[in-house]
Amino acid sequence: MAVVVVTGRGGAGKTTTTANLSTYFAQSDYRVLAIDGDLYLPNLGLHFALDNVKYTLHSVVKDPNMDPEWAIYKHKETGVYVMPGSSRLEDVLGISGQRLKEIIENLKYKYPLIFVDSPTGVPFDTLPAFEVFDYQIIVVEIERSPIYSFETMVENEVLKLKALGDRFGLEVGVVINKVREAADVIDKIVEVIETDIGVPVLGVIPFDDAVPESVNAGIPVLVYKPHSDAAIAFKEAGQLTEEWIFGSSPQR
């Protein structure tokens, strides 16, 4: 299975969500691969302290003869296999999204579950790869959207990104991140997403200072501070995502 993680705006926590959901599944004994699909502004490697490695996704994209396994690193603290991207300008120039599709398609035979961190907004970098994805998770941050304009935010972000997933026949879910609002407000928002839009909310993650701390440490918060509010919420999101993808009888 391949899952693409998307968002409508920067700073929503898409990469954090990718890192922690990948960690949940790795900690649950899945062989899971996290790929940095943001070809022009990659930073998934930072979340696993893999931002200065010899081979990256960009190395494999540029050299079709390279074994993709050369650019995959097992993160010792979480057990996640990670294919980080390169932030060097010379590596970014001339990158092909079509080649990314081929890499993901080939790796699906070796890794039962793949999470791909996609660019912000319309994911042009990963668009060719949508043909080989099975699931799409939309990460939404509501703190910067006043409640009176929430429906507009939903229309601009969730509905448009869902339409993209629908076009490729993907199952679509939502994670609400960086939540500071009261429970009754969140309940209303969840109802709008699940009832009016018709997609499941897989997680509601509170704002938590432990998250930036974990990024600085290069260890996703689920392992870095497992008893923090965000870690507990990511664990619950992982459980819901596991049921969403695999049902009651997961295949590992």
Image (cartoon, helix red, strand yellow):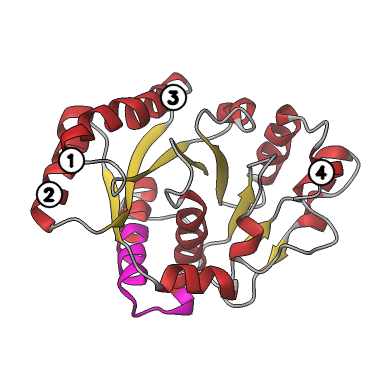
Is the residue 131 above or below the residue 236 in the image? above
Q: Give the residue number, with chain letter if any, for mark 2.
A: 185
Q: Is residue 98 magenta?
A: no
Instruction: Return the mark for residue 169.
Output: 3
Q: Mark 1 sits on what residue?
A: 147
Badge 2: few (under 14), some or many (20 or more) residues near its Cα, within 10 Å?
few
Residue occupying image coordinates x 33% and y 60%: 239
Q: Tag 1 or tag 4, which sits nearer the N-term?
A: 4
| Mark 1–mark 2 distance (CA, rounded to whole Å) | 8 Å
Specify which label sits upstream in the sequence, 3 or 4: 4
Question: Where does label 4 land, which residue?
Answer: 89
Residue positioned 36% across, 63% down in the render: 234
Going by the numbered disc 3, the residue's amino acid type is Gly
Q: Residues within 10 Å of mark 1 (few under 14, many from 20)?
A: some
Give the Cα separation between the discs numbered 1 and 3.
31 Å
Q: Which secondary structure lies at badge 2?
A: helix
Q: Nearer the viewer, residue 129 or 248?
A: 129
Q: Are marks 1 and 3 in contact (CB under 8 Å)?
A: no
* Part of the protein shown in magenta: 223-238
Residue 118 against residue 228 in the figure, above or below? above
Name the front one of labels 2 and 3.
2
